[in-house]
Image (cartoon, rainbow, N blue to C red):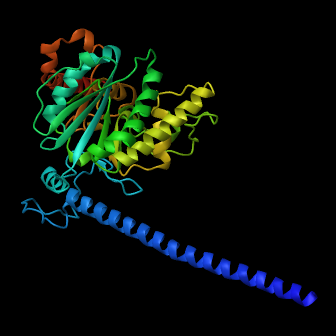
Amino acid sequence: MARSLWTLSMQYLSLHQVTFLLVALLLAIFGCGYWHQKNQIHRSELIRADAGERKQYWLQDRPLPKLIYPQPSALKPTRRDVLVLTSWLSPIVWEGTFNTDILNKQFQLRNATIGLTVFASQNYTAYLEQFLRSAEAFFMAGHRVNYYIFTDQPHAVPRIPLQSGRKAITFQIPSFEHQKDISRQRLEFISIYSKQRFHKEVAFLVCSDVDVSFQHDVGVEILSPLFATLHLSFYMASREVLPYERRPKSQAYIPNDEGDFYYTGSLFGGSVAEIHRLTAACHQMIVTDQSNNIDTLGYGESHLNKYLLYHKPTKILSLEYMFNKKMAFERWVSEHVNLFSLVKHVKILELPKDYIQTHNKDIATNYSERERGAGHCYTLTILFFFLCHQ
C-alpha cells in the first residue's frame, strides 16, 4: 500500500514537472516572438525618426553653399567693451559678434519654422498691429514664421498682409482682471500648446510681450535650445542687489550668494521641448506660491530667473533685444552707467505705457522713425548731463 502511494506521488510530481516545463517553453517561445516584434517596431520607429531628422536638417545630404566673408581672427575679438561669453560657455549675442549670412545659410539647411507667441488681452490688443507690422518687417526675414496670438478678443486681431510662408493663428483665452493671473495663464497656455500642438508645427518658439516694436533685424542668431534676455535695469549689477525672490518660503527663492544675471520675462525662447519644460515648471512654482499666499515680484519673472539659474540658458540675448530708452536714461542719471554706448542697434524696443493713448494708427506706423530721432535727443541730454558733472 505504501509503495503504491509512493508510485502515485512520483507520477503526480512528474506530471507537474512536465506541465511546468511545457508552460515555460510556451512562454519562452511567445516571449521571444513578442520581443522580436517589439524590437522590429522600435527599429522601424528609429529609422523613421532618423529619416525625418535627415529630411528636416539635410546637413549630411547638402553641402554648404559657397560664402565670401572675412576670415575670423583669434587676435581680434569682435567686441572688447562687453561680455560675449558666460562662464558656462554660452554666447551673449551683441551686434557685431555674428555673421548673419552664415547663420541664415546654416539655418536654411534645417528647413524649419519658427513660432512667435504673443498674448494680448483687454486693452493690450491695441499693441497688436504695431507688433505684427514691425515683426513682418524685421523678425526672421526670409524664414517661415507662425504667429501664435492668444487673446480674449479675437475680433480685435488686425488682419495685415503676411509674407509668403507666414501665417497668424489666433487662440481665444479667458479674460483676466489681474496682471498676475495673465502672467500665470501665459505660462500655462504655452506649456499646454507646446505639448499638444507646437511641437508638430515649429522647431523653435520665441515668446515675446506684445507692447514692443521690432526696430532692426532679429534673426536666427537668437535661436538656441534655451535662450534668455538680459534685463536692462539690472545689467552689470552685483548679485546682491538683483531683485531675486529672497523669501525662503517661495518657490522662486534664490539665496544672496547665488545668481548669474537677471533676465527679463519679456523675451525668451528655445526649442519647443525646452520651452515646454520651462513654462510647465514656472507655472507649477507660481501655483504653489499662490496656494501659500505668496505673491512674488515681476509676475512670474522671479520664477523664470529661478528656473534659469539651475537650468542655464544655452544663449543669452543682450540689451539690444529688449531696450527701454527711458530706463537706460534713468540708469545714466542715477548710476552714471551709459548703456547707450554699448548698444549699436536697438533690435526690439519696449513701447511706453501711454502708447495707446498718445499714438493713433498713422503715428504708430512711423513709430520707429520717430524713436530714432528721439534717440538723438537722449544722447544730447546725456552729454549735457555728463559735462555738467565734470
Q: Is residue 92 visible?
A: yes
Residue drawn at (15%, 51%) of the image:
104
Q: Can residue 216 be seen in this view?
A: no
- Which image quadrant is residue 27 in? bottom right
Viewer-closest of 98 and 250 = 250
Viewer-closest of 7 and 33 = 7
Viewer-closest of 36 and 51 = 36
Image height of 270 relative to 110, above or below: above
Q: Where is residue 373 in the image (x, y as percent from the top left)?
A: 14, 23
Q: Position of residue 386 (x, y in %)?
A: 28, 28
Residue drawn at (32%, 41%) of the image:
198
Q: Position of residue 205 (x, y in %)?
A: 31, 41
Viewer-closest of 332 and 128 = 128
Quadrant where the N terminus is found in the figure: bottom right
Quadrant where the C terminus is found in the figure: top left
Residue drawn at (43%, 33%) of the image:
187
Image height of 372 relative to 112, above or below: above
The answer to whether residue 199 is left or right of residue 70 is right
- Which image quadrant is residue 51 in? bottom left
Q: Position of residue 173 (x, y in %)?
A: 37, 23
Check the image and name the residue furthest to the top: 357
The answer to whether residue 80 is left or right of residue 244 is left
Residue drawn at (30%, 66%) of the image:
47
Image height of 96 relative to 109, above or below: above
